[in-house]
Amino acid sequence: MTLEELEIGHSARITAVGGEGALRQHFLDMGMIQGTEVTLVKLAPLGDPMELRLHGYELTLRREDARKIEAEPIDEARTEPKRSKKNKPVAHPGLGESGIFHAKDDGDPLPDDTVLRFALVGNQNSGKTTLFNRLTGANRHVGNFPGVTVDRKDGPIKGRKNTIVTDLPGIYSMSPYSSEEIVSRSFVLDEKPHAIINIVDVTNIDRNLYLTMQLLEMNIPMVIALNMMDEFNSNGGSVDINAMELMLGVPVVPISAAKNEGIEELIEHAVHVAHYQERPVRQDFCGKDKDGGAVHRCLHAIAHLIEDHAEEAGLPLRFAASKAAENDELVLKKLGLEGNEVETIEHIALQMERERGLDRAAAIADMRYKYIISVCRETVVKPRESREHIRSGKIDRVLTGRFTAIPMFILIMAAVFFLTFNVIGAGLQSLLETGVEALTSTVDEALSRAEIHEVLHSLIIDGIFAGVGSVLSFLPIIVTLFFFLSLLEDSGYIARVAFFMDKLLRRLGLSGRSIVPMLIGFGCTVPAVMATRTLPSDRDRKMTILLTPFMSCTAKLPIYAFFVNAFFPEKKALIMIGLYLLGILTGIFAAFLYKGTLFKGEPVPFVMELPNYRLPAAKNVLRLLWDKAKDFLTRAFSVILIASMAVWLLKSFDFSFNMVSNSQDSMLAIIAGGIAPILIPLGLGEWRITTALITGFMAKENVVSVLNVLYPGDVTASVSVLGAMSLLVFSLLYTPCVAAIASVKREMGGKWALATVLWQCGIAWVMALIVRLIGMALGAA
Amino acid sequence: MNIGDIIIIVLLAAAAAFALRTVIRRRRSGGCGCGCEGCTAGCDKRTAGKKKEQ
């Protein structure tokens, strides 16, 4: 049978892993190797993908990929992990401390002024960024889904001079699968840090140690940080740290990054191994007696063969040998082997495959996992099913249940928007609006009393206060929306959305993972574009990047709120939700178009880990809100302030720098009037609207501030209801702001960035025209 | 033009200069500064600088 045929709640043992290339390697790296027990937890509401449990964690897999994995049924999966027998106590090996390799203050240390560089490496969602924040005192954002960190970040360790620790995106193995994983592998391989801090999620230790095994092969001084020990212990688990340290040959430090436990000890050990360059005691885990010794002989034979090349290429020998055996093209290229040597490696690997009865990748993965199992058997007492896992199961029965998942998703998103636009955000907004109005009138009176020159008076009140003040009042709505998005992200729900939306998104030519950047896009397009780095295929990445601008970002909220309040105060929520839906529907249309033209082909397989639900940390959420509020205020008092002043200047003076009594004669009217005819078919041929839309390219909030400057009275007097509808649709879809375009340029290049600007403007124009024509046909004014 | 006008002009000029400086800095750092620490190619520039220092 294949895994696809497995029934819910039933278990099977894997007998062969099919597939090919990077995907197959990824299967193996995730622990899907011969002999592994797998239980089918559930199917997504639409019948695909499947949620599997293996090595104590949950993994998603599409049915068509599950078809590639052969298995034999077993009666019952081990629900209660077997507990190891109590071993004799092991003396503390003292690795990473003075006394084992050298006496105190002895050894062969690096010069004291060397800046020690540490790489923070671990699986996705293992707590690297939380640990990074602890080590450095930074405030980097953490989340609860795999792949929050998409780029590296450096920082010195708090209180330690001459240290730099680099937080890297999570990886499952040294065979990178997605683009952000390449960042991590390249860092370890090319930048040669003085030491690695390998963070291991102890609640999922089997799979996490797989990366550890590969890191040990790098022959770089290393410390293992066993994270989440608090959760592990509280559920009855324990680790014999001394025995584990002895078996792995590197210091092992139990920590809880979230609770700031064990961090000092970790730093001590990390600095020690880096300073004294204490490398792992062992890197060879193959064993000549294991499974007939075929893998052992293969790896050692290759190691002898390539020793000179590895040295010349600066690659760790053991790592290079295992990668050469696995046929890793990048490593083979770096080694620069001769034809004879390549052929010899191939013969050695073939012989190993014949003797072992497994192909090379599976045999090496199997060798590593067998050693991991022996380490865990000897040193780990696995806990009973954790409270967090039981709780997640219960929540998932509703949130990812067959009949409840999609209705719950719609309900949650509707609640988020309702609370943002109608209850919390809107309530706070009106308070702030009142405050801004009061301040404006106070300043206005004060300026009159002080007999300030009328030009300056007008600049302050009609330019700065009208522009910046109008935008400021939208701060509560934006912060509220980010608050809810942050809750969804930190709780682990977004990973579930990816799971049950996969089948739907596949129809659009995307994988479920694409939903994550798209949901982030409702906050801001820039991090959404960045988040696409977690997608393992270039095709999916590009397609998702091009779709994120259709997800209406928070910066557009002031535009919607401004027009909805002015024109449709009775149908506020309806129009707002309608705009969001229109953005999504246009995105779906664009996805179909891309799928059939620019991005033909199949979406990448959906292999993703589902984390347990966690209660978002208040500190984390508050920090994010503060960051967003700070950014918004910075923008209000920088780009929006400048734009408001510039627009006031241009609309108040003519080309001879005489103040105009009628803004129709101003510089702005003449400049914008040249572009305005393009928008005439949309009913937006007014120069003031053209100006507002152009300034929106710098920052979307500018549209409102500029409209406030240019329409000092009531905007409803100059724009019709149909014009307002048309303008709302145009604003929803036209080019993203310059920061978003810059991020598209960075990810895809200048041509794509330019194409995005033109395409988004084009589609916005067409959609606004359609809305206008429909409105006219229905007899709207 | 009275003393109040002069004070206002100085304050406005300072505010505009400060705002412009913020915009330029942000532009150079490459990100939107929206609190996303994973941002962006600016990091590559900073990293390159650090690499040289080390």
Image: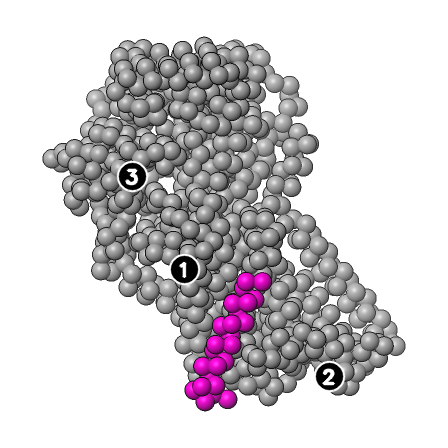
Label 2's element? helix
Q: Is residue A514 above or below residue A12?
A: below
Please provide the residue range marked out in magenta: A758-781
- Type of amino acid at the residue the image marks with label 2: Gln
Number of the label disc, if any, that sits on residue A41: none
Q: Is residue A399 above or below residue A101?
A: below
Q: Kindly report the distance in space between the C-alpha atoms of the residues bearing marks 1 and 3.
A: 35 Å
Q: Kindly report the distance in space between the C-alpha atoms of the residues bearing marks 1 and 2.
A: 44 Å
Q: Residue at x 82, y 76 (%)?
A: A655
**Residue A755 position by quadrant:** bottom right
Q: Residue at x 73, y 83 (%)?
A: A664
Number of the label disc, if any, that sits on residue A664: 2
Q: Kindly report the distance in space between the C-alpha atoms of the residues bearing marks 3 and 2.
A: 67 Å
**Residue A682 position by quadrant:** bottom right
Horizontal and vertical percent for residue A50?
Answer: 26, 46
Query: Is-magenta flag for residue A77?
Result: no
Pointers 1 and 2 in contact (CB under 8 A)? no
Q: Main structural element of the magenta stretch: helix, strand or loop?
A: helix
Horizontal and vertical percent for residue A486?
Answer: 44, 55
The residue that label 3 is drawn on is: A57
The residue that label 1 is drawn on is: A592
Label 3's element? strand
The N terminus of chain A sits in image quarter: top left
